[in-house]
Amino acid sequence: MPSHKIKLSDKGFKTLSTDFFVDIFAVLILFFVVLFSLFQQTNVIFIFGVFLLISIGVFIFYRTRNGYLYPLSYFYQILLFWAITPPIFLNWYTVPIIGIFLFGLYYNKNIIQSIYFPMSLYLSLLVTAMVFIFGKSFLYKELFSQDSASLYYFIDHTNISGYFFRANQSIIGSFHPDSFSILEKIGYFSPLLVITLSIRQKNVLLDFILLIGMGGLIFHFFGENLEYLKNRSIVLISLWYLIFAAPGRNKGFSLNYSLISLVFTGVITLLLIRGSYGFPPIMIPVTFFIIQSILYLLTQDPNAISLNIFKRNRLK
């Protein structure tokens, strides 16, 4: 039985699979990665503490009002949101707003789960959009500093993974270190997080096949810039898999839908690349999860589609 189907009884958790312990291990590893990064950047540690308290409050509210919520899945998404969002986007203005949105998502029921789009990615895109819309001048002033006399640290572009929300191009010039998320900063070490989720009992081989497909699409996306952006590619693949295989997310969803989503994502990405449209690399996994969410919604409505593939794999 998958970890997300662990049932809470009067005697506590009834565990029927070692996947539960894999989930625990994955959450702990991610927590220590985030915590270690925060101690190296103390200016956001208090903001993280406030956000964590808000998240705990939302979790308790949902449990008392609406019923059971798998805690490992919820807090994994909270930690992953913090790990993939650049610190420059996280401040005393954006975090309370994100807390309000988080409360709205869980006020009545788990809306994110009903559409199958990952909460961590949704919140990260939301806070990024807020900064770009309401603080664009501030963003570019702080994010890219070419002044050698400035107080900002300068990072060699050949030694960093890149920036999730920047368009597909080589990294040139100097960057404020806060523009890189925790996952981007750990660079080549990010596959270690993937390993924690790839040791489950079931579907290891099938996940590996999907991971190869993800890798092929990402490496093709960077194309001629691959020599400079190898690290960026590896981190983006790791991000994709960390969200895809998150505790409680896969919910028995057939691999067929994931492969279909990957194919459509590949087609859309190739069309955009050939059209010479510059778009942030984060949009590749976003496109994948949007397509997967649509397929998931179709499987929930018996009258939505009549293809045999959906009939055979419709969730019960």
Image (cartoon, rainbow, N blue to C red):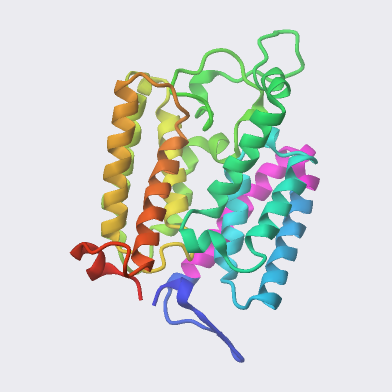
Q: Residue furthest left?
A: 308
- Relative depth, front residue between 38 and 271: 271
Q: Which residues are magenta?
A: 21-47
x%, y% of residue 38?
Answer: 71, 44
Total number of numbered labels? 0
x%, y% of residue 268?
Answer: 32, 35
Asked if one can make out residue 222 in the rendered structure from this viewpoint, the answer is yes
On the rendered structure, is 61 left or right of 233?
A: right
Q: Residue at x 70, y 8 (%)?
A: 147
x%, y% of residue 300?
Answer: 38, 67
43 up-or-down from 68: above or below: above
Q: Residue furthest bottom?
A: 10
On the rendered structure, is 215 left or right of 232?
A: left
x%, y% of residue 100?
Answer: 73, 53
**Main structural element of the magenta stretch: helix, strand or loop?**
helix
Q: Residue at x 32, y 70 (%)?
A: 302
146 magenta-colored: no
Q: Residue furthest top?
A: 148
Asked if one can make out residue 86 in the rendered structure from this viewpoint, the answer is no
The image quarter containing residue 288 is top left
On the rendered structure, is 7 left or right of 32?
A: left
Q: Residue at x 49, y 41 (%)?
A: 189
- Relative depth, front residue between 295 and 73: 295
36 magenta-colored: yes
Q: Which quadrant holds the C terminus?
A: bottom left
Q: Which quadrant holds the N terminus?
A: bottom left
Q: Residue furthest front?
A: 303
254 up-or-down from 128: above or below: below
Q: Residue at x 22, y 70 (%)?
A: 312
